[in-house]
Amino acid sequence: MKTEVTELLGIKYPIIQGGMAWVADYHLAAAVSEAGGLGIIGAGGAPASWVQEQIREARKLTDKPFGVNIMLMNPEADQIAQVIVEEGVKVVTTGAGSPEKYMKMWKEAGVRVIPVIASVALAKRMERCGADAVVAEGTESGGHIGETTTMALVPQVVDAVNIPVIAAGGIADGRGIAAAFMLGAKAVQMGTHFVVVKESIVHQNYKNHIIKAKDIDTRVTGRSTGHPVRVIRNKMTKEYLKLEQEGATLEELERFTLGGLRKAVVEGDTDNGSIMAGQIAGLVKEEYTCKELIEHLVAQTEELMKGTKLYE
């Protein structure tokens, strides 16, 4: 399964694990990389010292490439950007902002920069400022989302830029990967399915909610604030959506959800916590190891794509 992205990143398979805050620690990132994909450490809102420790711990578990995801709204984004260079990390994905201010430093250090984007305009801007590839993420994904579906977004981004496009959002199995390739993507990024792998540190309650979820079980909160987030419905989402309908302010809504993701991921509070997950939750029915999952995904994709250009 060699593509422009596998060559660019030095990985075996064109499968990238999403940089999910509180979920994507060094255990998960190292396991994904060891299995032939690209593992990502999710910095989220963590301090730079935590990110540095995670990078060093991951290196004890794998000598294969892995990356770091920076949420650019993190108060310590500047320090984390520097840590990436100092620790010799070769891949960075970015979200919640533009990485332009760090681009020169990263490029001089040989870092591959892959911003996550939700529009053609942002993809073109990232290409102009030197991005090596972009992740085109559709609204089907879990967590912070845009408005355009993966099926509509990916081919438009592919047509608009000359750098490789990585598809994300709504991809759960080999069928989704094959579809992404047919839309012009050169790799996929997956989040929700990696939440439930055996190496994931996520509380079992959270994993069980994803495994048991049906197709209609996700809700989008925060549309009124301009910061929509897709989660599995529970007591918290019901109360949050009620507050939105009643016209609660951004500050009131943020206070209500403060620490919500940690409650679900770490404490296993699936009533009052934020269970971020994509619409593919209804397709995740088994808890694999990373190796088992990636091998299954690759075998299914290869079978579906026999005779296509990728496998001529």
Image (cartoon, helix red, strand yellow):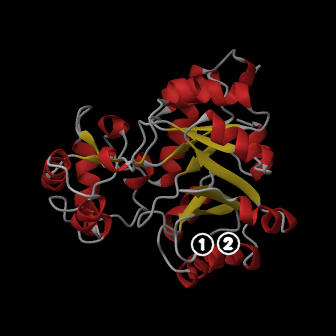
What's the CA distance linking mark 1 and mark 2? 6 Å
Give x and y (percent) for residue 168. Answer: 53, 39
Residues 61 and 151: in front is 151
Confirm whether residue 14 shows in the render.
no
Q: Looking at numbered disc 1 in the image, what kind of residue is underneath it?
A: Ala
Q: Looking at numbered disc 2 in the image, what kind of residue is underneath it?
A: Ala
Give x and y (percent) for residue 151. Answer: 51, 25
Left or right, 236 with reference to 232: left
> Which disc number belongs to residue 81?
2
Give x and y (percent) for residue 256. Answer: 21, 65
Locate residue 139: give its quadrant. top left
Residues 79 and 310: in front is 79
Outermost residue on the right side: it is: 108
Q: Residue at x 67, y 26 (%)?
A: 184
Residues 297 and 51: in front is 51
Outermost residue on the top side: it is: 307
According to the image, label 1 marks what residue?
Answer: 77
Is residue 243 positioned above or below 1 on the image?
below
Give x and y (percent) for residue 44. Answer: 48, 67
Secondary element type, mark 1: helix
Is residue 87 positioned above or below 190 on the image?
below
Q: Residue at x 47, y 29 (%)?
A: 149
Q: Residue at x 47, y 71 (%)?
A: 45
Q: Residue at x 71, y 60 (%)?
A: 91
Left or right, 192 with reference to 157: left
Locate residue 82: give its quadrant. bottom right
**Pointer 1 and pointer 2: residues touching (CB < 8 Å)?**
yes
